[in-house]
Amino acid sequence: MPERTDHLGHLEHLDVRKTYKLFVGGAFPRSESGRSYAVRAADGSLLANAALASRKDARDAVVAARGALAGWAGTTAYNRGQVLYRVAEMLEGRRAQFAEEVAAAEGLRAGAARRTVDASVDRLVWYAGWSDKVAQVLGASNPVAGPYFNFSVPEPTGVVAVLAPQSSSLLGLVSVVAPVVVTGNTVVVVASEERPLPAVDLAEVLATADVPPGALNVLTGRTSELAPVLAGHMDVDGIDLTGADPSSRAELERLAAANVKRVVATDEDLARTPSLRRLRAFVEIKTVWHPVGI
Amino acid sequence: MTGIETTESTRAAAGPVFDYAPAPESRDIVRLDPQYGLFIDGEFVPAAEGRTFTTINPATEEPLAAVAEAGPADVERAVAAARAAYEGAWGRMRGRDRAKYLFRIARIVQERSRELAVLESLDNGKPIRESRDVDLPLVAAHFFYYAGWADKLELAGFGPQPRPLGVAGQVIPWNFPLLMAAWKLAPALACGNTCVLKPAETTPLSALFLAQICQEAGLPPGTVNVLTGAGGTGAALVSHPGVDKVAFTGSTEVGKEIRKAVAGTHKRLTLELGGKAANVIFEDAPVDQAIEGIVNGIFFNQGHVCCAGSRLLVQESVADLVIDRLRERLTTLRLGDPLDKNTDIGAINSAEQLDKIRLLADVGSEEGAQRWSPPCELPSRGFWFAPTIFTGVSQSHRIAREEIFGPVLSVLTFRTPEEAVAKANNTPYGLSAGVWTEKGSRILWMAQKLEAGVVWANTYNRFDPTSPFGGYQESGFGREGGRQGLEAYLDV
């Protein structure tokens, strides 16, 4: 866009451009490797240079996620819901910015980009509400045939790596991350490789929405480089392969076998209201027995 | 309690006793209008017949405001407004947008919670510590919880397309005015119903503030209507043919009248009525926690709690110890100004309720139970009743059978768990019960045997929006809270 000048020929306001960095442990570091890569709009023009996360960055993010797990999983469901709802509030307040970013990243017209952002807000609100309801739908008291009180409750699986969808840069990202976080897992998400900027913007939203540092970490870079590290990482408990190249899925699943990771590899129409599938994917059902008697 | 005196044992143990300086919450945070109208179709309007009544501060008897008294014509208009909203904006709205309105209400309640807490203490007489730390957080949480259901009802386990019922007529009591309004409105709205709410005669103000919050949240007109008034207003509302669902919280006596009034109609009904809960203390109970639990069980909110632990059942082997400790603890309770942050026991809500408590307490003495209260100076104005314990109570005493709804505890004893169960269940009520023991298997055994909708173990008077609440037997039917609480407002 040509810059506007005043009557003296001075620029009215020259844009201060943002540096797009990683989001790890609540901070915004560059890649430890010092690498970056050019991110281009749908029309081929240069948008920005994003950090090209290294395998070391991925491992650092896992450390941050592991460190945040006990606190986040131990937070009351009510509190986690409030935090996720706060994320929706923050996103709502920056709709215009996100609509521009999504339009540029995905080549959408303005109206379609706005609707995508609105859908992302709604998706966050939908998942926020699940925080204190998922146990009421997935849990149960079990009428065992004996003098025992027996109940089953869902608990978070742990640290979950998520490969975000490649095409849908914001709605896709929110749709795969929110269900994992709301149940108490902590997350390392690899943003869409070609459309990573809305993910970095979302990290800025997370940083101002009371999400504890490390609960949600965002990496930008080459999915094919980072995915094997995360899939084979012994301190990652689950992985969502949605954004992986289909040809790499089998190999990633084999890597995930190393510590018996829970693996989700699903093609879901992310534009539709979700099912419970992703909420169920990364929870463990814990059953407790206790005798009944005088 | 001004001029606290201690028993000899505590004085010896604790040394000199320091009195508390007053720590009053500011009353100025609440700005009251001299007069309040009914909230119908999104507007505050006077009653059609122009009648008003005065609501007072029960701690001082000072008038707070004049409030419109709704008559049959107002009920007609409110039900019509609710019907129009049901067939219009609210009824057509997508669940996710209903959710957003409820989230807005939750947020505004959170933002204005200090003001609402002071208002509630002014109109109700409850200690600010309770309205601030219990009532208001639960109100916001309740709206937050049910907001989250509004856009996912098809996954709540009531079938693929659960439908709302229509217009809900909701009558609530004076003991938790704003919280009961939240318990009624939040699930009803989440499910897509519209509401006509009738707050209690002695505590109309917080429901009217909640109506203002509905306006502030931009809720479509007619979705929530608030009719202030007395028993006649409530009776007109529940018997109005345009009402599809009646929800009532209050006395068993009125609940039975309402059940008769809706007999033979299409109306769905839920009732949350009285109680005479047993709080059972076994000999292996953690005594310090149990004493706190007993105090919380019966003296929370001046005992104006339908699930209050008003019958203390103590195992005989520890009865003397528990009663001694309980008396000691009672001497440290502070009765007085509800707006003082140190106050434990506030004012009785009304002169009428005070009369009922006095009458039953006198009957307790006449029937032969031993009455005891800590030394306690009552303020000269307002409605007050000292915390009171009756020992030597038998099951046939009226104070062991009837709901007193005041700070009066009846103590009975038992020897075996079976006897505890038999005595605990020896009541037509069945709202709640408490069990205190270190033995987990006994807790669960007791929980199976007790005929009560809520059983608290090693705690008492806990509430959460995710947790269903409601009674067995004459304590009513239907549940409020939790996933189960949706059922009362769905055509399933």
Image (cartoon, rainbow, N blue to C red):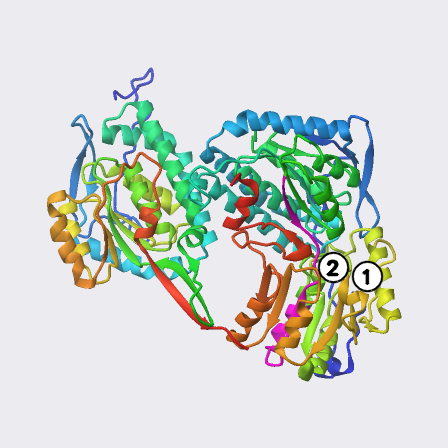
Q: Badge 1 is on which residue?
A: B385
- Give residue B195's quadrant in the image: top right
Q: Secondary structure beneath disc 2?
A: helix
Q: Nearer the viewer, residue A57 or B359?
A: B359
**Along the line of sight, the residue nearer the viewer: B320 or B360:** B360
Find residue B104 and report its horizontal and vertical position in percent: 53, 38
Badge count: 2
Residue in the image at 71% along x and 27% along y: B76
> Would residue A55 be found to the left or right of residue B22 on screen?
left
Asked if marks 1 and 2 touch (Cβ < 8 Å), the reply is yes
The chain containing the residue under callout 2 comes to B
Q: Is residue B282 magenta?
A: yes
Report how far apart the C-alphas of labels 1 and 2 lie in the structure: 8 Å
Tell me where the magenta segment starts and ends, as one range. B268-294
The residue at 89%/69% (across/down) is B366
Residue A232 in sight = no
Quadrant that contains the N terminus of chain B: bottom right
Residue B271 vs A40, above or below: the answer is: below
Q: Residues within 10 Å of mark 2 (few under 14, many from 20)?
A: many
Answer yes or no: are tags 1 and 2 on the same subunit. yes
Q: Percent x, y for residue A157?
A: 31, 58
Q: Is B137 contained in the magenta span?
A: no
Q: Residue furthest front?
A: B264
Location of residue B370 in the rendering, given as x and y in whole percent from the top left corner = 83, 75
Q: Is residue B208 left or right of residue A19?
A: right
Among the two numbered marks 1 and 2 on one chain, the one whose residue lies closer to the N terminus: 2
Q: Amino acid at mark 1?
A: Phe
Residue, disc 2: B302
